[in-house]
Amino acid sequence: MFRRNYLMLESLTNFRDIGGYRGLDNKKVTQHLMYRSGEINHLTKEDHQAFLEDYHIQTIFDFRSTSEREERPNELFDGVTTVAIDILKGMEQSVGMADLKEEASQKHPDEYMLDIYRAFITEPSAREGYKEFLETVATLDTPFIFHCFAGKDRTGFGAALILALLGVSELDIYHDYLLTNKLRKKANNKLIETMAREGMPKEQLEMFRIMMEVKYEYLAESFAQIKEHFGTVEQYVLEGIGVDAATISQIRNKYLED
């Protein structure tokens, strides 16, 4: 496992570089090109400047729904292009903050989350969204970031998909995925404290807390669906979402280095 010094933008939750891991032919996933995070709003002046001048991010992939983007718009950055891809557009249920708060009134948060992770494989809008994401990533020559509300589910699967295509080990893919629980801890505590002040019952608060974390079992459900229906991640990308072999090769050539 490649150990990294996790990047810090104090006002950008769940932010990290997904490069640095070992992939196909023992090549390294290129660093300083692919970043992931939660929603990009309320940055400090210093972090806003660092986003551009230190990380040189030129493209933002926003996996949130239209309503999420309207309610909590991202900050604007000079010279940065936003690609809006509503990953779960075709579903009644989603994983935005409003959806999770509503679902927290139920008693089966794990079942809800497992349904979401199955949908990443089976839902047409998810397949179309990740297809657009991968095909666009293959064309970029500058750093990019991808995110959703919390940067944990839609973003977490997106990161796992890229890393798997690049040949990163399952151990390292889950390592990157589960880092969310460490990197979102402060933000999650703050959200729960706010909801407690607003009068959310303790049992509902606990359900919400569970749903704001990630579990090995969630991502494992996505991979189980891929294995059952397609065999491998590469076959899922080729057959399930329709990205061609040339694009996969382009991604590997661009984001792997000796």
Image (cartoon, rainbow, N blue to C red):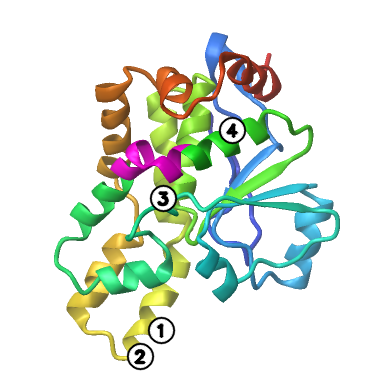
- Circle 2 residue: 198
Circles 3 and 2: CB distance less than 8 Å? no
Numbered disc 4: secondary structure: helix
Provide the major secondary structure of the magenta segment. Answer: helix
Between marks 1 and 2, how big is the CA–CA gap? 6 Å
**Rounded to the nearest whole Å, what is the CA distance between mark 4 and mark 1?**
37 Å
Which residue is label 1 attached to?
A: 194
Residue 1 visible somewhere in the drawing: no
| Residue appearing at x 26%, y 76% in the figure | 205
Mark 1 touches mark 2? (CB < 8 Å): yes
Residue at mark 3: 153
Which callout, 3 or 2, points at the residue further toward the start of the chain? 3
| For discs 3 and 4, the disc positioned in front in the rendered view | 4
Identity of the amino acid at label 1?
Thr
Q: Which of 218 and 126 is in front in this view?
A: 126
User: 35 or 228, which is in the foreground?
Assistant: 228
Name the foreground residue: 210 vs 87.
Answer: 87
Q: Earlier in the sequence, mark 2 or mark 4?
A: 4
Q: What span is in magenta?
A: 118-127
Give the crowd class for mark 3: few <14, some 14-19, many >=20 residues within 10 Å.
many
Which residue corresponds to mark 4? 134
Vertical position of residue 193 compared to residue 189: above or below: below
Specify whether residue 246 is in view: yes
Image point 46% across, 35% down: which residue? 160
Quarter placement of the C terminus: top right
